[in-house]
Amino acid sequence: MELTRRDLLESGALLITGLAAGGFAAIGAPATPVAACYNAPPSLRAVAMRRLAFGPSPELIAMYEATPGSNDEERFDNWVRQQLNPAAIDDTPCANRLAATQLKIRYTYNNQTMNEIRSLNWLNASREWLWQHRVIPDLAWAERMRPYDEVRVATWIRAVYSRRQLFEVMVDFWHNHFNVRADADSRIAATWPDYDRIIRTHALGNFHTLLLEVTKSVAMMYYLNNVSNKAGGGEGGNENFARELFELHTLGSEHYLKFYDQRENIPVVEYGSERFAAAYIDYDVYEASRCLTGWTIANGRDGRPNTGAFYLMEAWHDNFPKTVLAPAPLPGIPPAPNFPFNNGAQRDGEEVLRLVARHPGTGRHLCKKLCQRLVADDPPEVLINAAYTVWMQHRDSPDQIRRVVETILLSPQAKNIFGHKMRRPLESIWAFLRATNANLPSDVASVNGNATEGNYWQRLFWNVDQTGHRLFGWDTPTGHPDRAEYWANTNALLRSWNCFYTISQSWGGNVGIDIVGQTPAGLSCAGIVDFWLQRMLTYTPTGDLRTLLINFLAQGGDPNQPPQPLRGAPDWGSTEAVRDRIKAMVQLLAMSPEFWLR
């Protein structure tokens, strides 16, 4: 109704004031760092549902409450350990949704129009199979993009329905860490299920193994151009991947000595019996690029087979000695090369990846990022140190990452910090869908005989992409920012708020959200608000939010009675107005700082 829509926007303006007080940037104001709304979490259940998952759902809350434990902390600890063993969690309902989902494909190619709905048939295809059937043939662009589109759909389904929520959070973390824009190249999009499978296979495994597999993937090879890295003059071959290997994937920019080429003056860091140059310089990037010359893809060129598999092109490899992160033997004395002559493409590449993966700077950089993702934008140094100790101790363990995540999540800091993270737009939308028990769409070939309609998933993606949080679509290798000051701005907030309404419309995504049907009958205005506060937040806040929502629902009536339609305009006594008001109240709740902070 018009009044409900207007009231929603007017009440949203009031909530903007609350967002600013909670640390969000108000409309028209520059983005500022988020300020915590809480010094301590409302409960450990709130931490489990809101930071170790994409949000609470009735099913996940029931699973948490059924977790053994004689007290809250013991239950939380057991929950974390269960979630860190995802293979032991029955995820059949989510798997059934994946199997039942239909995704439309429509295009005109060679004067023929294709209009079909298909299952997600490419999710489990091997890299070689994808290459042979999506890359090599003469296909329409939509067919080449199809595997990528299917992974996007599957990622949404898993985020909203999977019981393995912590695992999905970690998959999202590693996709962002090893960011690749999936539609940057048709070969990347066509083989995207393989890249997603690499991330999912090793998300809780060993970092060095994950790094090795990512480096060899079609997606990373083409995205950062190592596919064309061959020995040459000057600084060697293509250094795009090598640069990001140091700056983003391993040591991080905090361990970069800008334009510093005097290796003899770089400090030395020791771990056990190992000695490393404490930081990297441009020459380390150049030399690492030389180590990786000849690492490419079998794409049918220059005598290579055309299978899409990782391929070593020995004729491209620079076999001269190289020096990467070698420590000075004594201050002022430059180190000798640590990669010998004629070491070979495979050994050079594997050894440089092992070297950066094991470096203490990498451990420090990655542990800080994990703490930032799972606890706070500015995590306590004591927590980073604890994670770093476990990281280094288990560099060779097959479950290194799982051990580090467990250390972080079972720490006192993780249990006692709340509200120091802000949901990014896509996360807020997933949280809204989870809390409202939404039904994600399934495409149809046509609507009322119109074959151009029925592509609900593409409309859903388009609407959500407008928030700036584009799944697998971030342009640069940095990945989506994971700090509040980037997202606490007019565009991201307002566009996300709009999505809470638009995605349920046929033109916005056709997501099934039955808020009224899930609201217990006969509740007072206060009772309805309290019901949805528990569903959406897992607790009842002590600030003004509850009062604001109750007043919005009551519209001047008795808050201790069920909401009634206004006798005058524009409701004219219509019960439909009450239904719209309940929906709008839940959407308002999703706009609140309490919903966005975690």
Image (tube, rainbow, N blue to C red):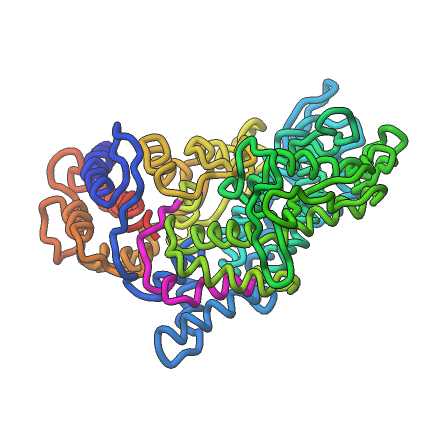
At horizontal 59% and vertical 69% (from top left) the residue drawn is 88
In magenta segment, residue 528: no
Residue 428 at x, y percent in the picture = 39, 45
Q: Is residue 365 above or below residue 78?
A: above
Residue 73 at x, y percent in the picture = 37, 73
Residue 488 at x, y percent in the picture = 33, 38
Judge whether residue 411 can be spotted in this image: yes
State left or right for residue 417 relative to residue 7: right
Residue 427 at x, y percent in the picture = 43, 46
Residue 236 occupies which quadrant of the picture? top right
At horizontal 85% and vertical 29% (from top left) the residue drawn is 301
Q: How many marks?
A: 0
Q: Magenta span covers which residues?
A: 402-423
At horizontal 34% and vertical 61% (from top left) the residue drawn is 46
Judge whether residue 579 can be spotted in this image: no
Q: Is residue 348 above or below residue 570?
A: below
Residue 136 occupies which quadrant of the picture? top right
At horizontal 62% and vertical 35% (from top left) the residue drawn is 243
Q: Is residue 108 above or below residue 431?
A: above
